[in-house]
Image (cartoon, helix red, strand yellow):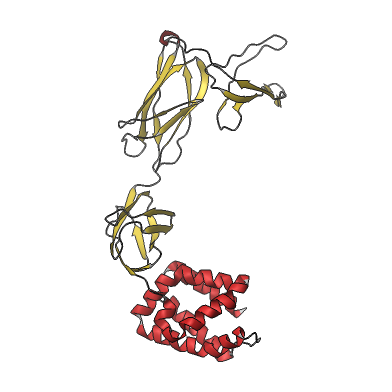
Amino acid sequence: MLNQINSLNDINYTHPIDVGKVNKIIFTRVPKGNYMLVFRSYLSSAGETWDSEPVSFAVKSTLPFPSAASTSVLEGVVTDVKSGNPVPGATVNFIFYSSKTDSAGKFKIEHLPTIKKALLSAVASGYSDGTPVSVSTESGKTVTCNVQLTPLGDYDLCGQVTGAVTQGVTMTLSEKSSGTLQTDASGNYCFRNLEAGSYTLTPSLKGYVFEPPSKSVEITDTDVSGVDFTSSKGSCPAQLAAPDNVALLRRFRDEVLARSQTGNEYISLYYRHAPEVARLLQLQPHLRKDAAQLTQNLKPWMLAQLSGKKVRLPYHTKNHIAAFVKALRVKASPSLKADLQQLQYNFNQ
């Protein structure tokens, strides 16, 4: 086995040897680089395998290419196993050699030496890695070998973001499979090669809120389109719910919460979901009113904390927080809902 150091490339060359005799093996067309050579022997009668001591060496120059008459060509087509359509842009690998398929899915690797057996494989975006194919080449001949790739799925899930912002919105796909992409200048997005199943789509962009905050989609036996969202400029939840106490809330954030690990986790949680919480407060006046009352109830406790006093949170205030979090979760996105649930659990410990 010849392995190129700091590379995934290697040559696995199998050949019977005559025990007790000198056996010569030649590796051709080896690129420049540092290598390690190991001979792995297998005695079939005893079922034993052993490796030689590794030998390291460097290839500093290569011989000129042999003439076309003394080399071989490996060519073929990479296709979609389900549709039979060509797969353009696939990378075809054969030992140290590689080639890209053209628009018709065709590839060609030239100037190959005689190789008794090696593996040909192909990879492409949107497809699972194909099963390697064993190929032999012979000088002066052209060998044809086609490769099939299996798509990750058959269906597309597409939509558009309109409103205050369209371009650069991060669309997050979750559940059956996961992934992210950004909308184009027109707000369009499309997840391709998906399998049938249940998915959740969530748009996000700092400073903006989206209606709805997420959508659940079921793919059955056809593509899904029209999964659209409307964006609007986000607001600060504290400014919406308690404009008269914003200065106090920010001081509590900087002088109390920011001085502990748990407090910093609460700060990160707030800013991660601030756009969505602001949207929920805007759309639900009763929730905004409840948040204002809760902030007012917390004011004496926050002032005591700021003065350095160790004061327990009143029991009725803890119940008020629990009720508010529960109400906020009703129309929250899956991401916000999960974080609120974890927050409630931590709060009750």
Q: Residue at x 34, y 78 (%)?
A: 283
Identify whether 129 is placed above or below 304.
above
Identify whether 261 is placed above or below 198.
below
Q: Residue at x 41, y 80 (%)?
A: 239
Question: Where residue 7 sits: x, y (%)?
Answer: 57, 32
Q: Residue at x 41, y 11 (%)?
A: 68
Left or right: residue 168 versus residue 113 is left
Q: Quadrant of residue 104?
A: top left
Left or right: residue 65 versus residue 191 is right
Q: Quadrant of residue 256?
A: bottom right
Question: Where residue 303 sits: x, y (%)?
Answer: 57, 87
Q: Nearer the viewer, residue 197 or 290?
A: 290
Q: Residue at x 35, y 56 (%)?
A: 168
Identify whether 32 is placed above or below 175.
above
Identify whether 333 is placed above or below 55.
below
Q: Quadrant of residue 202?
A: bottom left
Left or right: residue 34 versus residue 239 is right
Q: Nearer the viewer, residue 318 or 259?
A: 259
Q: Quadrant of the N terminus?
A: top right
Question: Where residue 250 sits: x, y (%)?
Answer: 51, 78
Question: Where residue 241 sits: x, y (%)?
Answer: 41, 83
Left or right: residue 288 versus residue 261 is left
